[in-house]
Image (cartoon, helix red, strand yellow):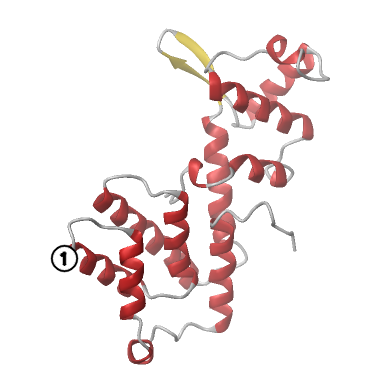
Amino acid sequence: MNFLKINDIDYRNILINNYKELNLTENELIVLLMIDSINKNEKTLISGDQLAFKMNLNSQQIDEIIVSLMNKSFLSYQQDGDILITSIENTYQRIISFVEKKYLEDSNDETIKNQEENLTRILKILEEEMKRSLSGLEMEKVINWFNEGVNVNVIENSINECIMKSNKVSINAIDKLIIKNLTHVDREEEGYSTVSEKTKKDIKKAMDIASYDWVNRHDE
């Protein structure tokens, strides 16, 4: 289950920085970026002739690349009303899956898997209560709660408290309640600080990936 949406992440930057790992060539990458740019303005059926005058590749080479991207499930043809268009939606889904895989990679720890499920559930609760999708900054704040090791029960209780106290639910209001509820005694008595240091580092690494710090990313 995807807990990210394509607009939550800098997907172009992710694509550029990880195209090799996504099994793309340099030429396939640039064609994908060109198609994405065109689709932002007008969804249409894209051919090599259409792109050739903008690139150092001829139309035949570009058509072969488009076929390759179709075979790799990065592009597809879709019916949009009365016209057939070249869709890049598959690429968006591939990028989202890639980010979520990164979230869990290098760790088989059940705690990390639970974090993904808990994060997905909390995001769903918040979007239902707020009756809209979270902004990038709001999502980053929610991710930071998990990054800081806040127990999911504390988060849920704070959300419920916010709902009872006010008709308008906001991330900032919930954040203040979480801080209030996370006293030192709570941490010791309820075990909110019992996560091992290794697990905390794993969670931090995973959350850092999910919080879109891709521009400054350094491969290990």
Please give the name of the residue rendered at 67% of the width and 25% of the height, measured from the top-left corner.
34
Q: Splitting the image into 4 quarters, where does residue 22 fall?
A: top right
Q: Nearer the viewer, residue 185 or 15?
A: 185
Looking at numbered disc 1 in the image, what kind of residue is underneath it? Met
Please give the name of the residue rendered at 46% of the width and 54% of the height, measured from the top-left corner.
137
Please give the name of the residue rendered at 31% of the width and 80% of the height, measured from the top-left corner.
181
**Where in the figure is residue 98, as x and y percent of width and height?**
58, 48
Instruction: Check disc 1 and report its element: helix, strand or loop.
Output: helix
Q: Splitting the image into 4 quarters, where does residue 94 fall?
A: top right
**Where in the figure is residue 19, as x and y percent of width and height?**
71, 42
Label 1: which residue? 164
Quadrant for the C terminus in the image = bottom right
Please give the name of the residue rendered at 66% of the width and 43% of the height, measured from the top-left corner.
13
Q: Nearer the viewer, residue 58 or 42?
A: 42
Q: Nearer the viewer, residue 38 or 73?
A: 38
Query: Dot 1, crowdedness within 10 Å: few (<14), some or many (≥20)?
Result: few
**Where in the figure is residue 139, as x and y percent of width and height?**
44, 55
Left or right placement of residue 220 versus residue 104 in this view: right
Q: Is residue 187 above or below residue 153?
A: below
Q: Is residue 11 above or below residue 100?
A: above
Total numbered circles: 1
**Where in the figure is residue 16, as x and y percent of width and height?**
70, 41
